[in-house]
Amino acid sequence: MAANNEKTPSLSNKCIDLILSKTLIYSHHSSIHHHHHHHNQTPLPPPSEAAMAKQNKTHFIFPETQSTVLPDPSNFFSSTLLSKPLPTNSFFQNFVLKNGDQPEYIHPYLIKSSNSSLSLSYPSRQVNSAFIYQVFNADLTISSKQGSSGKHLISSYSDLSVTLDIPSSNLSFLLVRGSPFLTVSVTQPTPLSITTIHAILSFSSNKTNTKHTFHFNNGQTWILYASSTIKLSHTLSEITSDAFSGIVRIALLPDSDSKHEAVLDKFSSCYPVSGEAIFREPFCVEYKWEKKGSGDLLLLAHPLHVQLLSNGDNDVTVLEDFKYGSIDGDVVGVVGDSWVLQTDPVYVTWHSTKGVKEESHDEIVSALSNDVEGLNSSSISTTSSYFYGKLIARAARLALIAEELSYPDVIPKVKKFLKESIEPWLEGTFNGN
Protein backbone atom coordinates (compact mmCIF):
# COMPACT_ATOMS: atom_id res chain seq x y z
CA MET A 1 0.00 0.00 0.00
CA ALA A 2 1.15 3.53 -0.71
CA ALA A 3 2.17 5.21 2.53
CA ASN A 4 1.13 8.68 1.38
CA ASN A 5 -2.10 9.96 -0.18
CA GLU A 6 -0.99 9.64 -3.80
CA LYS A 7 -3.28 7.31 -5.73
CA THR A 8 -1.60 4.31 -7.29
CA PRO A 9 -2.07 4.27 -11.08
CA SER A 10 -5.04 2.12 -12.02
CA LEU A 11 -4.16 -1.40 -13.12
CA SER A 12 -5.11 -2.49 -16.61
CA ASN A 13 -7.85 -5.07 -17.07
CA LYS A 14 -5.29 -7.39 -18.67
CA CYS A 15 -3.16 -7.19 -15.52
CA ILE A 16 -6.17 -7.82 -13.28
CA ASP A 17 -7.16 -10.83 -15.39
CA LEU A 18 -3.64 -12.20 -15.10
CA ILE A 19 -3.65 -11.80 -11.31
CA LEU A 20 -7.13 -13.29 -10.94
CA SER A 21 -6.55 -16.22 -13.26
CA LYS A 22 -3.48 -17.55 -11.49
CA THR A 23 -1.89 -15.77 -8.58
CA LEU A 24 -4.83 -15.08 -6.27
CA ILE A 25 -6.34 -18.47 -6.71
CA TYR A 26 -3.10 -19.72 -5.21
CA SER A 27 -3.98 -18.07 -1.90
CA HIS A 28 -5.72 -21.36 -1.17
CA HIS A 29 -2.18 -22.77 -0.73
CA SER A 30 -0.85 -19.83 1.24
CA SER A 31 2.15 -21.66 2.70
CA ILE A 32 3.61 -22.55 -0.70
CA HIS A 33 5.53 -20.02 -2.76
CA HIS A 34 5.63 -20.42 -6.53
CA HIS A 35 7.17 -18.11 -9.12
CA HIS A 36 5.18 -17.98 -12.34
CA HIS A 37 6.99 -16.87 -15.51
CA HIS A 38 4.40 -15.80 -18.08
CA HIS A 39 5.35 -15.88 -21.76
CA ASN A 40 4.21 -12.30 -22.36
CA GLN A 41 6.58 -10.90 -19.75
CA THR A 42 10.19 -10.00 -20.48
CA PRO A 43 12.42 -11.13 -17.61
CA LEU A 44 14.30 -8.34 -15.87
CA PRO A 45 18.03 -8.15 -16.61
CA PRO A 46 20.28 -9.08 -13.68
CA PRO A 47 21.36 -6.07 -11.61
CA SER A 48 24.82 -4.67 -12.23
CA GLU A 49 27.64 -5.42 -9.79
CA ALA A 50 27.68 -1.78 -8.70
CA ALA A 51 23.95 -1.85 -7.96
CA MET A 52 24.34 -5.07 -5.98
CA ALA A 53 27.25 -3.70 -3.98
CA LYS A 54 25.19 -0.64 -3.13
CA GLN A 55 22.23 -2.83 -2.18
CA ASN A 56 24.35 -4.97 0.16
CA LYS A 57 25.61 -1.93 2.04
CA THR A 58 22.16 -0.63 2.94
CA HIS A 59 20.58 -2.76 5.66
CA PHE A 60 17.04 -1.75 6.49
CA ILE A 61 16.32 -2.09 10.20
CA PHE A 62 12.71 -1.93 11.29
CA PRO A 63 12.20 0.78 13.92
CA GLU A 64 11.70 -0.51 17.44
CA THR A 65 8.14 -0.17 18.67
CA GLN A 66 6.36 -0.81 21.94
CA SER A 67 3.20 -2.77 21.29
CA THR A 68 0.18 -1.92 23.42
CA VAL A 69 -1.32 -5.32 22.59
CA LEU A 70 1.50 -7.82 23.04
CA PRO A 71 3.80 -7.68 26.05
CA ASP A 72 7.54 -7.75 25.46
CA PRO A 73 8.52 -11.41 25.94
CA SER A 74 12.25 -10.76 26.26
CA ASN A 75 12.02 -10.54 30.07
CA PHE A 76 11.83 -14.32 30.13
CA PHE A 77 14.51 -15.06 27.54
CA SER A 78 18.13 -15.43 28.55
CA SER A 79 20.27 -12.48 27.44
CA THR A 80 22.29 -14.89 25.28
CA LEU A 81 19.22 -15.40 23.05
CA LEU A 82 18.32 -11.74 22.53
CA SER A 83 20.71 -11.09 19.64
CA LYS A 84 18.61 -13.30 17.35
CA PRO A 85 14.94 -13.16 16.36
CA LEU A 86 12.70 -14.78 18.98
CA PRO A 87 9.92 -17.25 18.13
CA THR A 88 6.47 -15.63 18.04
CA ASN A 89 4.28 -18.73 17.90
CA SER A 90 6.06 -21.53 19.74
CA PHE A 91 4.78 -24.48 21.75
CA PHE A 92 6.18 -22.84 24.92
CA GLN A 93 4.99 -19.26 24.41
CA ASN A 94 2.93 -19.19 27.63
CA PHE A 95 6.24 -19.35 29.52
CA VAL A 96 7.31 -16.00 28.02
CA LEU A 97 4.08 -14.02 27.59
CA LYS A 98 2.76 -11.59 30.22
CA ASN A 99 3.70 -13.06 33.62
CA GLY A 100 4.90 -16.34 32.06
CA ASP A 101 2.72 -18.26 34.51
CA GLN A 102 0.17 -20.02 32.27
CA PRO A 103 0.47 -23.77 31.61
CA GLU A 104 1.71 -25.35 28.37
CA TYR A 105 0.87 -28.86 27.21
CA ILE A 106 4.09 -30.78 26.65
CA HIS A 107 2.83 -34.36 26.14
CA PRO A 108 1.88 -36.04 28.38
CA TYR A 109 1.93 -33.30 31.04
CA LEU A 110 0.63 -29.79 31.51
CA ILE A 111 3.57 -27.75 32.81
CA LYS A 112 3.42 -24.39 34.51
CA SER A 113 6.12 -22.16 35.95
CA SER A 114 5.47 -19.48 38.56
CA ASN A 115 6.87 -18.16 41.83
CA SER A 116 10.32 -19.71 41.27
CA SER A 117 8.84 -23.20 40.98
CA LEU A 118 7.66 -25.56 38.27
CA SER A 119 4.37 -27.48 38.52
CA LEU A 120 3.44 -30.65 36.72
CA SER A 121 -0.06 -31.94 35.99
CA TYR A 122 -1.12 -35.20 34.38
CA PRO A 123 -4.39 -33.68 33.24
CA SER A 124 -7.89 -35.01 33.23
CA ARG A 125 -10.14 -33.99 30.33
CA GLN A 126 -13.50 -32.26 30.59
CA VAL A 127 -15.85 -32.83 27.67
CA ASN A 128 -19.01 -31.04 26.62
CA SER A 129 -20.83 -30.54 23.32
CA ALA A 130 -18.70 -27.51 22.41
CA PHE A 131 -15.14 -28.51 23.30
CA ILE A 132 -12.70 -30.70 25.20
CA TYR A 133 -10.32 -29.07 27.62
CA GLN A 134 -7.65 -30.29 29.99
CA VAL A 135 -7.81 -29.38 33.64
CA PHE A 136 -4.60 -28.26 35.36
CA ASN A 137 -4.11 -29.60 38.89
CA ALA A 138 -0.67 -29.18 40.45
CA ASP A 139 0.09 -32.88 41.01
CA LEU A 140 3.74 -31.98 41.72
CA THR A 141 5.44 -28.63 42.33
CA ILE A 142 9.25 -28.58 42.36
CA SER A 143 11.33 -25.78 43.87
CA SER A 144 14.33 -25.09 46.08
CA LYS A 145 13.62 -25.76 49.76
CA GLN A 146 15.50 -22.57 50.59
CA GLY A 147 12.93 -20.58 48.63
CA SER A 148 13.82 -17.96 46.07
CA SER A 149 12.29 -14.89 44.50
CA GLY A 150 13.81 -14.98 41.00
CA LYS A 151 11.80 -15.50 37.82
CA HIS A 152 12.40 -18.27 35.31
CA LEU A 153 14.41 -17.83 32.10
CA ILE A 154 14.35 -19.68 28.79
CA SER A 155 18.02 -20.51 28.19
CA SER A 156 17.64 -22.55 24.98
CA TYR A 157 14.96 -24.00 22.73
CA SER A 158 14.60 -26.17 19.66
CA ASP A 159 11.72 -27.57 17.58
CA LEU A 160 10.96 -30.26 20.15
CA SER A 161 12.32 -28.88 23.42
CA VAL A 162 12.72 -25.88 25.67
CA THR A 163 15.08 -25.47 28.63
CA LEU A 164 13.56 -23.46 31.47
CA ASP A 165 15.95 -22.29 34.18
CA ILE A 166 15.24 -20.92 37.63
CA PRO A 167 18.73 -19.46 38.20
CA SER A 168 18.09 -18.35 41.79
CA SER A 169 17.31 -21.99 42.69
CA ASN A 170 20.04 -23.72 40.60
CA LEU A 171 17.33 -25.59 38.69
CA SER A 172 17.33 -26.22 34.95
CA PHE A 173 14.29 -28.07 33.54
CA LEU A 174 14.89 -29.92 30.25
CA LEU A 175 11.35 -29.92 28.84
CA VAL A 176 11.13 -32.20 25.82
CA ARG A 177 7.93 -32.88 23.95
CA GLY A 178 6.73 -36.45 24.39
CA SER A 179 8.97 -37.37 27.30
CA PRO A 180 7.28 -39.46 30.02
CA PHE A 181 9.94 -38.12 32.42
CA LEU A 182 10.26 -34.58 33.69
CA THR A 183 14.04 -34.03 33.75
CA VAL A 184 15.66 -31.42 36.00
CA SER A 185 19.35 -30.66 36.25
CA VAL A 186 20.32 -29.34 39.69
CA THR A 187 23.44 -27.36 38.89
CA GLN A 188 24.74 -26.67 42.46
CA PRO A 189 24.13 -28.57 45.73
CA THR A 190 20.58 -27.50 46.60
CA PRO A 191 17.95 -28.92 48.97
CA LEU A 192 14.75 -29.60 47.00
CA SER A 193 11.07 -29.35 47.82
CA ILE A 194 8.37 -31.32 45.99
CA THR A 195 4.82 -30.50 47.07
CA THR A 196 1.48 -31.91 45.95
CA ILE A 197 -2.16 -30.83 46.29
CA HIS A 198 -2.93 -34.48 47.11
CA ALA A 199 -2.08 -36.53 50.18
CA ILE A 200 0.90 -38.87 50.09
CA LEU A 201 -0.42 -42.30 51.07
CA SER A 202 2.80 -44.30 50.73
CA PHE A 203 6.47 -43.64 50.09
CA SER A 204 9.32 -46.09 49.45
CA SER A 205 12.98 -45.94 48.43
CA ASN A 206 15.51 -48.40 47.04
CA LYS A 207 18.67 -49.31 48.98
CA THR A 208 20.89 -46.80 47.16
CA ASN A 209 18.38 -43.95 47.49
CA THR A 210 18.45 -43.39 43.73
CA LYS A 211 14.83 -44.44 43.14
CA HIS A 212 11.83 -43.31 45.20
CA THR A 213 8.17 -44.21 44.64
CA PHE A 214 5.23 -42.26 46.04
CA HIS A 215 1.51 -42.99 45.83
CA PHE A 216 -1.14 -40.26 46.20
CA ASN A 217 -4.73 -40.40 47.38
CA ASN A 218 -5.97 -39.52 43.88
CA GLY A 219 -4.72 -42.91 42.65
CA GLN A 220 -1.51 -41.61 41.01
CA THR A 221 1.88 -43.24 41.51
CA TRP A 222 5.03 -41.24 40.68
CA ILE A 223 8.62 -42.48 40.53
CA LEU A 224 11.66 -40.26 41.10
CA TYR A 225 15.07 -41.33 39.76
CA ALA A 226 18.32 -39.58 40.68
CA SER A 227 21.78 -39.74 39.10
CA SER A 228 23.29 -40.28 42.57
CA THR A 229 22.07 -40.81 46.13
CA ILE A 230 19.34 -38.38 47.18
CA LYS A 231 17.91 -38.64 50.70
CA LEU A 232 14.23 -37.72 50.88
CA SER A 233 11.80 -37.26 53.75
CA HIS A 234 8.11 -36.39 53.57
CA THR A 235 5.08 -35.00 55.37
CA LEU A 236 1.47 -35.46 54.24
CA SER A 237 1.90 -33.28 51.14
CA GLU A 238 5.60 -32.35 50.83
CA ILE A 239 8.78 -34.27 50.00
CA THR A 240 12.11 -32.63 50.82
CA SER A 241 15.73 -33.56 50.14
CA ASP A 242 19.15 -32.87 51.55
CA ALA A 243 21.43 -30.75 49.36
CA PHE A 244 21.73 -32.49 45.97
CA SER A 245 23.33 -31.79 42.61
CA GLY A 246 22.90 -33.88 39.50
CA ILE A 247 19.99 -35.12 37.40
CA VAL A 248 16.53 -35.86 38.79
CA ARG A 249 13.85 -37.49 36.63
CA ILE A 250 10.22 -37.88 37.67
CA ALA A 251 7.60 -39.93 35.81
CA LEU A 252 4.00 -40.91 36.36
CA LEU A 253 3.58 -44.69 36.47
CA PRO A 254 0.90 -45.35 33.80
CA ASP A 255 -2.38 -46.50 35.41
CA SER A 256 -0.35 -46.97 38.63
CA ASP A 257 0.28 -50.45 37.23
CA SER A 258 3.53 -52.04 38.45
CA LYS A 259 3.93 -53.95 35.16
CA HIS A 260 5.07 -50.65 33.57
CA GLU A 261 7.66 -49.94 36.26
CA ALA A 262 10.35 -52.05 34.58
CA VAL A 263 10.05 -49.89 31.43
CA LEU A 264 10.60 -46.67 33.39
CA ASP A 265 13.50 -48.29 35.27
CA LYS A 266 15.17 -49.44 32.07
CA PHE A 267 15.08 -46.04 30.34
CA SER A 268 15.49 -43.75 33.35
CA SER A 269 19.24 -43.18 32.74
CA CYS A 270 19.03 -41.76 29.21
CA TYR A 271 17.52 -38.28 28.89
CA PRO A 272 16.87 -35.96 25.94
CA VAL A 273 18.20 -32.40 26.04
CA SER A 274 16.91 -31.08 22.70
CA GLY A 275 15.22 -32.18 19.49
CA GLU A 276 15.04 -30.98 15.90
CA ALA A 277 12.53 -31.55 13.10
CA ILE A 278 14.59 -32.06 9.93
CA PHE A 279 13.15 -31.97 6.41
CA ARG A 280 15.46 -34.02 4.21
CA GLU A 281 13.16 -35.08 1.39
CA PRO A 282 9.56 -34.47 0.24
CA PHE A 283 6.71 -35.80 2.39
CA CYS A 284 9.11 -36.82 5.15
CA VAL A 285 10.28 -35.28 8.43
CA GLU A 286 12.86 -36.67 10.84
CA TYR A 287 12.63 -35.99 14.56
CA LYS A 288 16.17 -36.19 15.90
CA TRP A 289 16.96 -35.86 19.60
CA GLU A 290 20.21 -35.07 21.37
CA LYS A 291 20.53 -37.32 24.41
CA LYS A 292 22.77 -37.71 27.45
CA GLY A 293 23.26 -40.44 30.02
CA SER A 294 23.39 -44.16 29.28
CA GLY A 295 21.14 -46.58 27.44
CA ASP A 296 18.40 -45.93 24.90
CA LEU A 297 15.96 -43.03 24.75
CA LEU A 298 12.27 -43.55 25.60
CA LEU A 299 9.73 -41.05 24.26
CA LEU A 300 6.02 -41.11 23.51
CA ALA A 301 4.26 -41.01 20.13
CA HIS A 302 0.64 -40.11 19.47
CA PRO A 303 -1.50 -42.13 17.01
CA LEU A 304 -0.53 -40.14 13.91
CA HIS A 305 3.18 -40.47 14.75
CA VAL A 306 2.78 -44.24 15.07
CA GLN A 307 1.04 -44.44 11.70
CA LEU A 308 3.75 -42.35 9.98
CA LEU A 309 6.57 -44.24 11.72
CA SER A 310 5.30 -47.45 10.14
CA ASN A 311 5.75 -45.92 6.66
CA GLY A 312 9.35 -44.80 7.18
CA ASP A 313 12.70 -46.55 7.37
CA ASN A 314 13.02 -46.61 11.15
CA ASP A 315 15.32 -48.10 13.73
CA VAL A 316 12.83 -47.72 16.59
CA THR A 317 10.85 -50.04 18.84
CA VAL A 318 7.20 -49.22 19.60
CA LEU A 319 6.06 -50.33 23.07
CA GLU A 320 2.34 -50.66 22.35
CA ASP A 321 1.36 -51.62 25.92
CA PHE A 322 3.20 -48.69 27.54
CA LYS A 323 0.90 -45.71 27.17
CA TYR A 324 -0.43 -42.51 28.67
CA GLY A 325 -3.69 -40.71 27.94
CA SER A 326 -3.61 -37.41 26.03
CA ILE A 327 -5.97 -34.99 24.33
CA ASP A 328 -4.66 -36.40 21.01
CA GLY A 329 -5.43 -40.01 21.90
CA ASP A 330 -3.20 -42.47 23.77
CA VAL A 331 0.53 -41.79 23.44
CA VAL A 332 2.69 -44.94 23.35
CA GLY A 333 6.34 -45.62 24.14
CA VAL A 334 8.89 -45.42 21.32
CA VAL A 335 12.52 -46.39 21.92
CA GLY A 336 15.05 -44.60 19.69
CA ASP A 337 16.53 -41.11 19.25
CA SER A 338 15.60 -40.66 15.57
CA TRP A 339 12.11 -40.98 14.11
CA VAL A 340 11.48 -40.87 10.36
CA LEU A 341 7.87 -39.81 9.77
CA GLN A 342 6.79 -40.53 6.20
CA THR A 343 3.44 -39.36 4.79
CA ASP A 344 1.67 -40.40 1.63
CA PRO A 345 2.51 -37.95 -1.18
CA VAL A 346 -0.02 -35.13 -1.57
CA TYR A 347 0.75 -33.02 -4.64
CA VAL A 348 -0.35 -29.41 -5.01
CA THR A 349 -2.52 -29.11 -8.12
CA TRP A 350 -5.06 -26.65 -9.49
CA HIS A 351 -7.77 -29.28 -9.68
CA SER A 352 -8.80 -32.20 -7.46
CA THR A 353 -6.33 -35.09 -7.45
CA LYS A 354 -8.96 -37.81 -7.89
CA GLY A 355 -11.39 -36.08 -10.26
CA VAL A 356 -15.16 -35.78 -10.03
CA LYS A 357 -17.46 -38.81 -10.09
CA GLU A 358 -19.73 -38.67 -13.14
CA GLU A 359 -22.83 -39.40 -11.07
CA SER A 360 -22.08 -36.40 -8.82
CA HIS A 361 -21.53 -33.93 -11.68
CA ASP A 362 -25.04 -32.46 -11.88
CA GLU A 363 -25.40 -32.11 -8.12
CA ILE A 364 -22.06 -30.25 -7.86
CA VAL A 365 -22.99 -27.96 -10.79
CA SER A 366 -26.26 -27.13 -9.03
CA ALA A 367 -24.50 -26.34 -5.72
CA LEU A 368 -21.84 -24.34 -7.58
CA SER A 369 -24.48 -22.23 -9.36
CA ASN A 370 -26.15 -21.45 -6.02
CA ASP A 371 -22.84 -20.45 -4.41
CA VAL A 372 -21.86 -18.20 -7.32
CA GLU A 373 -25.32 -16.62 -7.35
CA GLY A 374 -24.71 -15.57 -3.74
CA LEU A 375 -21.46 -13.68 -4.49
CA ASN A 376 -21.85 -9.96 -3.85
CA SER A 377 -18.78 -7.80 -3.27
CA SER A 378 -20.79 -4.94 -1.75
CA SER A 379 -22.07 -7.20 1.04
CA ILE A 380 -18.59 -7.99 2.47
CA SER A 381 -18.69 -6.60 5.99
CA THR A 382 -15.26 -7.57 7.34
CA THR A 383 -12.30 -5.20 7.11
CA SER A 384 -9.86 -7.83 8.43
CA SER A 385 -7.26 -8.74 5.80
CA TYR A 386 -7.33 -12.31 7.16
CA PHE A 387 -11.07 -12.96 6.87
CA TYR A 388 -11.40 -10.84 3.72
CA GLY A 389 -8.62 -12.88 2.10
CA LYS A 390 -10.38 -16.13 3.01
CA LEU A 391 -13.60 -14.86 1.38
CA ILE A 392 -11.77 -14.02 -1.83
CA ALA A 393 -9.87 -17.33 -1.86
CA ARG A 394 -13.12 -19.27 -1.45
CA ALA A 395 -14.65 -17.40 -4.40
CA ALA A 396 -11.56 -18.04 -6.56
CA ARG A 397 -11.93 -21.71 -5.72
CA LEU A 398 -15.42 -21.67 -7.29
CA ALA A 399 -13.88 -20.65 -10.63
CA LEU A 400 -11.46 -23.57 -10.43
CA ILE A 401 -14.28 -25.99 -9.65
CA ALA A 402 -16.24 -24.65 -12.62
CA GLU A 403 -13.21 -25.13 -14.85
CA GLU A 404 -12.76 -28.73 -13.71
CA LEU A 405 -16.46 -29.44 -14.28
CA SER A 406 -16.30 -27.89 -17.79
CA TYR A 407 -19.06 -25.50 -16.72
CA PRO A 408 -17.72 -22.06 -17.74
CA ASP A 409 -21.08 -20.23 -17.49
CA VAL A 410 -20.44 -19.08 -13.90
CA ILE A 411 -16.82 -17.95 -14.34
CA PRO A 412 -17.57 -14.38 -15.54
CA LYS A 413 -19.57 -13.66 -12.38
CA VAL A 414 -16.73 -15.03 -10.19
CA LYS A 415 -14.20 -12.85 -12.08
CA LYS A 416 -16.42 -9.79 -11.61
CA PHE A 417 -16.63 -10.46 -7.85
CA LEU A 418 -12.86 -10.97 -7.57
CA LYS A 419 -12.11 -7.81 -9.56
CA GLU A 420 -14.44 -5.69 -7.43
CA SER A 421 -13.18 -7.12 -4.14
CA ILE A 422 -9.43 -7.15 -4.88
CA GLU A 423 -8.90 -3.90 -6.81
CA PRO A 424 -9.49 -1.60 -3.78
CA TRP A 425 -6.68 -3.39 -1.91
CA LEU A 426 -4.28 -3.12 -4.84
CA GLU A 427 -5.10 0.55 -5.48
CA GLY A 428 -5.02 1.63 -1.84
CA THR A 429 -8.65 2.76 -1.87
CA PHE A 430 -10.03 0.15 0.54
CA ASN A 431 -11.73 2.12 3.31
CA GLY A 432 -11.19 -0.34 6.11
CA ASN A 433 -7.44 -0.59 5.60
Image (tube, rainbow, N blue to C red):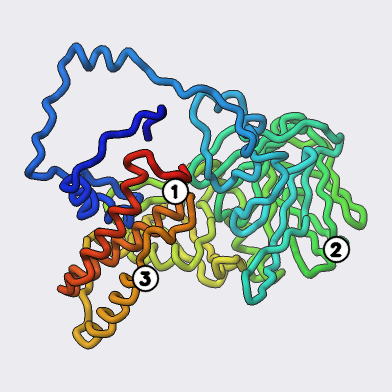
**Tag shown at residue 202:** 2
Work out how far the residue at label 1 is from the one at label 3, CA to CA, in angstroms: 21 Å
Q: Is residue 345 visible?
A: no
**Does residue 329 appear left or right of residue 142 in this picture?**
left
Residue tagged 1: 385
**In this rendering, which labeled residue sits more in front, label 2 or label 1?**
1
Whichever of callouts 2 and 1 sits on the residue coming sooner in the sequence is 2
Q: How far across and how far down the image is residue 238, in percent? A: 87, 51
- 88 vs 377: above or below: above
* 3D distance between C-alphas at marks 2 and 1: 58 Å
* Mark closer to the chain start, 1 or 3: 3
404 over 358 or under it: above or below: above
Residue found at x 63% / y 32%: 72
Circle 3: element type: loop
Q: Position of residue 305 (x, y in %)?
A: 44, 62
Kind of residue at badge 1 = Ser
Residue 211 placed where, x, y %?
73, 53
**Amino acid type of the residue tagged 2 in the rendering:** Ser
Of residue 206 and residue 394, the one placed in the foreground of this image is 394
Residue at image x 33%, y 33%? 7
Res. 374 mark: 3
The N terminus lies in which quarter of the figure?
A: top left
Q: Which of these two is toward me, 281 or 16? A: 16
Percent coordinates x, y for residue 230 in the rendering:
78, 43
